[in-house]
Amino acid sequence: MQTLNRRQFLKLAGVASALAALPRAVGAATTPARVVVVGGGFGGATAAKYIRMWGDNVQVTLVDTNATHISCILSNLVMTGALSMSRITLGYSALKTNHGVNVLQGRAVAIDGAGNTVTVSTASGNRVLPYDHLVLSPGIDFIAPPAGAWDANLTPHAWQAGAQTTLLKNQLAAMRNGDLFVMTVPKSPYRCPPGPYERACVAADYLKRKGRVGAKVIVLDANASIQAEPVAFGEAFNVTHAGMIEYVPNATVQSVVSSTRSIVTSARTVNNAKVLNFIPNQKAGAIAAGLPLNAQGFVPVNPLTYGVAGYPNIHVIGDACAVPASDNKAVPKSGHMANSEAKVCADAIVRALAGEAPDDNVTTNSACYSPITARTASWLSANYNYGDIYDAAGNVKGKGMHRVDLGEADIIGGDNYEDMFTWADSLFADSFM
Amino acid sequence: MQHKLFLPIALALGLAVAGSAIAAPPAGRLLASQCAQCHGTNGNGPGFDELAGKSARELRDELLEMKYRGRVEGIMDRQAHGYNDAQIQLIADYLSAQPGGGGGD
């Protein structure tokens, strides 16, 4: 060790040490620490805000391709026309003015993990941003179907909100008597476990309210059963929307031809649907592709830091990460959970910059409301605590985020519908303002 | 020259490994931040019931009642099950010390 000069030591620490970072006072007493956050959805926005709030004058740069973030949360109500797109469009100006976050519009295209820089392609050329910690919150990318000719502009997934939502909204509005709205539920894990079932409900409700006689929603689920709120959505499918929704489990997608809105699955083939809302299987956003990935294409992380194995100062949060959890009790990919994970990551980064170990008294949670009709909604609640995690047989398999509670609404009612907006607006504000 | 440079690093490292108390975050801050998705940053709204500035005892007792009363009346009864009693105390203490309108309720 004594033969190392300072520069060599820092380089080693950055690449190979178990310590996430040296105390800033050692290497650069006068230079503030720099954190770059890639992806300005719920995870990235929250991370940028909380690192500014909690850190000691940390320079934070938030990078996103778009000038605003359009929330997937509530976007099914934009599809039905109940809400406007502006209602779910979240800007970054409050992060700048309230919290001093630097916002850079551009696409992160390359990470130099050894050199601690990230390259961002912007309208005025490439910019190379140095960082002490890099937080990636890139969301999801899609996996193409095994065969056919898939074109998301013809058969919108609307699983990233914005132009895709408008496409699907217009297609739903064009449906007439006897038309079929065919949608898929991706193989788990995917973004927002209740989301596809919620969409089926509000699409069916829309068609009913418009008096589209004989129109139906067919749900082709790649999974064996409903993946979230099985009681609420079971009731919604079998009672509330009886005759309007046909649920088909174990429907593995084999081929999609977008031009004819045709889909072949292991359980059902539909040709020439009026609307084909093919929501593909998912993996981590593209910028994470160079990092270690699990079999599903997501980045395994340390649940106390969201750090990535082999990259001590790179963190992945939100839908793109895979959190170690007990078998059959996975941590859901949701905007609410991304916000939750961002705070754990922010706290760990602030501690690392001060030379401290991460806190291990860590919890995360997800809570959400799902509209079932134009006036009613259900809710879902899930809590995770850091500690032992278990395999399916109940044996301890390691440490991670163990699900300590899970519940859903026992009454699908109007109060929940009102509460849905209180929840969403609170989450929007905690993340973006 | 190299020895001079190395010394302060070694000292700082020693502190870091020993878990120094440099700028230690307030106890309960991270736990309580997990309430903010529905109650606003630092429990200060917008959202459901404003929590900032409420008495720690009231916050703790309400959370414990929701956790242990044995029936679930709403989403917050479920969320209260997500924390052990020590965590609930830390959350209550932290939120009670935040400036806000919760104390006026």
Image (cartoon, rainbow, N blue to C red):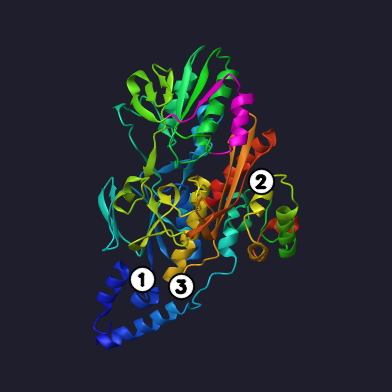
Q: Nearer the viewer, residue A164 or A336?
A: A336
Viewer-nearest of labels 1 and 3? 3
Q: Which mark is residue A31?
A: 1
Q: Is residue A286 above or below residue A23?
A: above
Per the model, the C-alpha gap separating discs 3 and 2 is 35 Å
Q: Pointer 2: residues within 10 angstroms few (<14), some, or many (20+)?
A: some
Specify whether residue A230 is painted magenta: yes
Residue A156, x across and y down, in percent: 40, 28
Disc 2 element: helix
Q: Which residues are magenta?
A: A228-251
Amino acid type, mark 3: Glu
Q: Is residue A55 above or below residue A193?
A: below
Residue assigned mark 2: B75
Q: Specify the subunit that label 1 lies on.
A: A
Q: Are marks 3 and 2 on the same chain?
A: no
Disc 1 from disc 2: Cα separation: 45 Å
In x, y percent, where is residue A275?
A: 43, 21
* Residue A258 visible in the snapshot: yes
Determine if marks 1 and 3 fall on one subunit.
Answer: yes
Residue A372 at least partly seen? no
- SS state under label 1: loop
The amino acid pointed to by label 2 is Ile
Q: Looking at the rendered structure, which numbered label has been put on residue A380?
A: none
Number of marks in picture:
3
The chain containing the residue under callout 3 comes to A
Q: Quadrant of residue B52?
A: bottom right
The residue labelled by disc 3 is A356
